[in-house]
Amino acid sequence: MDGWWLAIGVLVGGPLGVLATLWLTRRLWRGARRLSARARGKEHFAELGQLAAGLAHEIKNPLSTININLQLLVEDLEHYRDETHGRWLRRLLSVQEETGRLKGILDDFLQFAGKVELNPTVTDLRALMGELTDFFMPQAEAARVVLRTALPETPVSARVDGKLLKQALLNLMLNAVQAMDRGGELLIRLSAARSQALIEVTDTGPGIPTEHLPKVFQVYFSTKSGGSGLGLPTTRRIIREHGGDIRVQSALGKGTRFVISLPLAKG
């Protein structure tokens, strides 16, 4: 191929054409090498992702067996009332709690690492959000959180995978309730502006420090004790798969608001 470029350079511009062609050929060759290296890098990361997901699955299976056996041991020890068996029971319960937390981390990882396959249908978001808030109401009440909704009177329709969108919203609502450990208010608002459906999840919690705001969607970033740091990245991934976006606003001592934008259904 270099020979053809040199021949063209001689025909077009003589010696100067040859020099220019050599320079261009060298740039093209370097560019091709960089593209090849990037492609290999992407393949390597894809393989690492598959390996990590497979490893998580392999860990999860024996972990389930461990949890079952721990539960059986706990049930056996609960029959005894002496101090020795009580001490063993407390230790087993501590181990059971940690294995449960590990299982939760693995579940979150597999959910985040897995392929998102949408099955979208035209959906009235008012009905979807009404179902979700009815489902979540008992959990909010148990945490002394007043759950309110502000839904429009007219339909707001979007092409969404209802199950995945509920999962994304549920992550935000759970985070909000956990942030308001002394109770508070949680407002779920739906509106439409131009060609976008807007979903707002607003809490009256302590707020997010300014320096943490750019990091909240980063994988494994979490300010919660025992948090996996995958809930918000998973939510953003689901929203983006729908062609939408999510942003966050927060003020210390006042609360936090997440705003999701989704394309309205055409026609």
Image (cartoon, grey):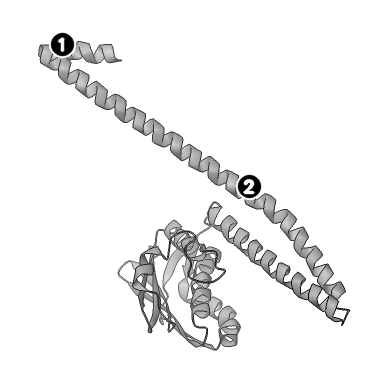
| Image quarter of residue 208 | bottom left
Q: Residues within 10 Å of mark 1 (few under 14, many from 20)?
A: some
* Position of 154 relative to 73 (above/below): below
Q: Position of residue 155 (x, y in %)?
A: 42, 75
The numbered disc on residue 54 is 2
Residues at marks 1 and 2, CA–CA distance in whole angstroms: 57 Å
Q: Closer to the camera: disc 1 or disc 2?
A: 2
Q: Residues within 10 Å of mark 2 (few under 14, many from 20)?
A: few
Question: Relative to 88, is 252 on the left or the right?
Answer: left
Label 1 vs 2, first from the N-terminus: 1
Identity, as a three-letter code, of the amino acid under mark 2: Gly
Image x and y of residue 120, in percent: 50, 59
Residue appearing at x 51%, y 87% in the figure: 182
Q: Nearer the viewer, residue 230 or 132?
A: 230
Quadrant location of the N terminus in the rendered image: top left
167 or 177: nearer the eye?
Answer: 177
Q: Pick the quarter of the image with the C terminus.
A: bottom left
Residue situated in front as seen by the camera: 243 or 96:
96
Answer with left or right where residue 70 lies relative to residue 18. Answer: right
Q: Amino acid at mark 1?
A: Val
What is the secondary structure assignment of the residue under circle 2?
Answer: helix
Query: In this view of the protein, can residue 16 be seen by the observer?
Result: yes
Say if 83 sits above or below 99 in the image: below
The x and y percentages for residue 6 are 21, 13
User: What's the residue at 57%, 69% (across, down)?
Assistant: 226
Secondary structure beneath dot 1 equals: helix
Q: Residue at x 32, y 66 (%)?
A: 195
Q: In the drawing, what numbered circle is on residue 59?
A: none
Residue shown at 39%/31% (left/top)? Answer: 36
Residue behind mark 1: 10
Residue 210's spot in the image, x, y percent? 34, 72
